[in-house]
């Protein structure tokens, strides 16, 4: 077998390898969460200032925000637990989205994700309509912050993990 017989096989192998590298280089990188969008904002903990919506006087910060390929911004609220998504998680994510809107991010959707499940929520286009969805929780939180004694409304699943459950008079 002479070197001229091997050349076409070698050339094909080199072209195949170069083609593979080019495709890999230009292929869009898959986001770890599977989100089709560009990561535009990350909460880096205490050093990250929360967003504030002056009109509705709410503040908050999502864990991540993505500019979606379709349109709008997706805010992500990640919970490190394995369990289900609670209503309070959704309210927290909606509040953070409204706060981010106050700083110019047009959040149109939220994703609440735990280690075991995830759920997307489309948000109303209007800030007023979004605030209406969380208004009762905002009022409740503001009353508690002002020192007003509020009636505890525990649910059994919350009592199981509460650090104060042994001495609580309001156990479910």
Image (spheres, grey):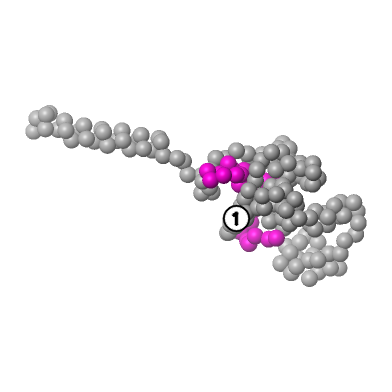
Image position of 130 with respect to 22: above or below? below
Q: Quadrant of the C terminus?
A: bottom right
- Is 151 situated left or right of 104 in this image? right
Please tell me which residue is depicted at 62% across the width and 50% down the height of the picture: 109
The foreground one among 67 and 76 is: 67
Residue found at x 71% / y 38%: 103
Q: Residue furthest bottom?
A: 172
Relative to 126, say whether 1 is above or below.
above
Quadrant of res 104: top right
- Answer whether residue 142 is visible to the viewer in this image: yes
Residue lying furthest top:
3
88 or 128: which is nearer to us?
Answer: 128
Magenta-drawn segment: 61-87
> In screen coordinates, is 95 left or right of 41?
right
Q: Position of residue 93 (x, y in %)?
A: 68, 51
- The reply to whether the magenta stretch includes residue 110 is no
At horizontal 22% and vertical 35% (from top left) the residue drawn is 12
Q: Is residue 132 shown above or below 74?
A: below
Whether 82 is among the magenta residues is yes
Q: Disc count in the image? A: 1
Residue occupying image coordinates x 63% and y 39%: 41
Residue 92 visible: no
- Disc 1 crowd rating (10 Å Cα; few below 14, some 14-19, many 20+) is some
Across and down, in percent, residue 142 comes to 85, 52
**Viewer-nearest residue: 121 or 4:** 121
Q: List the residue tagged with mark 1.
A: 120
Percent x, y for residue 150? 87, 61
Q: Secondary structure at mark 1?
A: strand
């Amino acid at each position: 077998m002479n070197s001229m017989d091997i050349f076409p096989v070698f050339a094909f192998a080199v072209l195949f390898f170069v083609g593979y590298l080019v495709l890999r280089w230009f292929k869009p990188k898959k986001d770890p969460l599977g989100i089709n969008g560009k990561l535009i904002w990350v909460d880096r903990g205490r050093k990250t200032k929360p967003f504030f919506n002056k009109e509705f006087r709410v503040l908050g910060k999502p864990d991540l925000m993505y500019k979606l390929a379709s349109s709008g911004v997706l805010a992500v609220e990640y919970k490190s637990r394995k369990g289900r998504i609670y209503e309070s998680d959704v309210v927290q994510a909606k509040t953070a989205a409204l706060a981010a809107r106050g700083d110019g991010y047009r959040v149109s959707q939220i994703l609440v994700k735990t280690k075991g499940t995830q759920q997307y929520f489309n948000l109303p286009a209007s800030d007023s309509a979004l605030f209406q969805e969380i208004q009762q929780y905002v009022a409740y939180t503001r009353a508690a912050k002002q020192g007003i004694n509020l009636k505890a409304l525990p649910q059994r699943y919350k009592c199981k993990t509460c650090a104060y459950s042994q001495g609580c008079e309001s156990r479910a």
